[in-house]
Amino acid sequence: MANVALRYSRFTGRNPVVVSVPRGGVTRLHLPGDEVKVHLVRAVLKAHAESGEELELLGAATAELDVRAREGLRRRVGAVSREVGLISNLNAWENISLPAAYHGAPPLAEVAELAQAVLARFGAEPDAFLARLPDELGALERRLAAFVRLLVGAPELAVFDDIADGLTRPERERVAEFEAEYRARQPLGTLLYLDTLETA
């Protein structure tokens, strides 16, 4: 398991699936449908497999974890996904900094520095961007806010779930640059792209 970031299987429902993702690289998975994808993303983010599923995550068999170990494992994973959408009544800064404020790390000054740098790198005016509510952000901007929030957690496994869905071609080109930004900050990290066969 040392060389596998994620091993997942699900044999219930209409579309059984078995997934294995090696550590440290970039993997693109085209899953048979949205139901399978949602179950996989939820299992990974919770570090917990439901009935009919099996999950090994970052070298740990999740069925064997106690509550504390499961929480520690969850903090090593991040996603840009509808499953972890932005909170509508919090502005972009509050959404980005909420996990750090909750866990007490990293310090909010570091979060602000990272947010300013990444937003500027992607052509946003940081102060104006961070003050806006999710409904005031465009589709690409909402993904950018979620991506910055992911970077704050420095995840060893980053999941990009249908990250380009519904974007224009120029916006998809900008989102494609998230990979290099993640890799620059997490050179040993694992990046997993998910979509369905319908959207591949």
Image: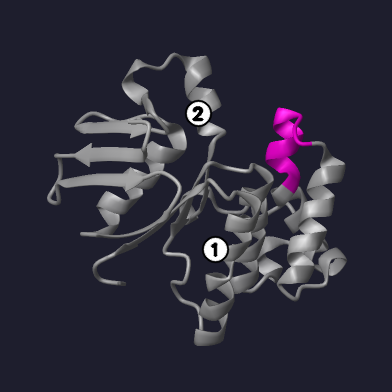
Image position, residue 19 (x, y; %): 25, 46
Image position, residue 120 (x, y; %): 79, 69
Q: Give the position of the N terminus as an image quadrant.
A: top left
**99 in magenta:** yes
Viewed as shown, does residue 56 lie left or right of 95?
left
Q: Can you say whether 187 is above or below 133 in the image? A: above
Residue at (65, 69) in percent of width and height: 141
The amino acid sitting under disc 2 is Leu
Q: Tell me the element at label 1.
A: helix
Image position, residue 99 (x, y; %): 68, 38
The amino acid sitting under disc 1 is Glu
Q: Can you say whether 18 is above or below 76 in the image? A: below
For the record, the magenta segment spans: 97-106
> Which residue was labeled with disc 1?
179
Residue located farthest toward the bottom when viewing the structure as drawn: 169
Disc marking residue 73: 2
Disc marking residue 170: none
Residue at (47, 71) in percent of width and height: 164
Q: Give the position of the C terminus as an image quadrant.
A: bottom left
Q: Tell me the element at label 2.
A: helix
Viewed as shown, does residue 13 lie left or right of 67?
left
Residue at (35, 45) in percent of width and height: 22
- Picture quadrant where residue 194 is located: bottom left
Q: What separation in Å lies between label 2 and label 1 (alpha carbons)?
A: 22 Å
Q: Nearer the viewer, residue 135 or 152?
A: 152
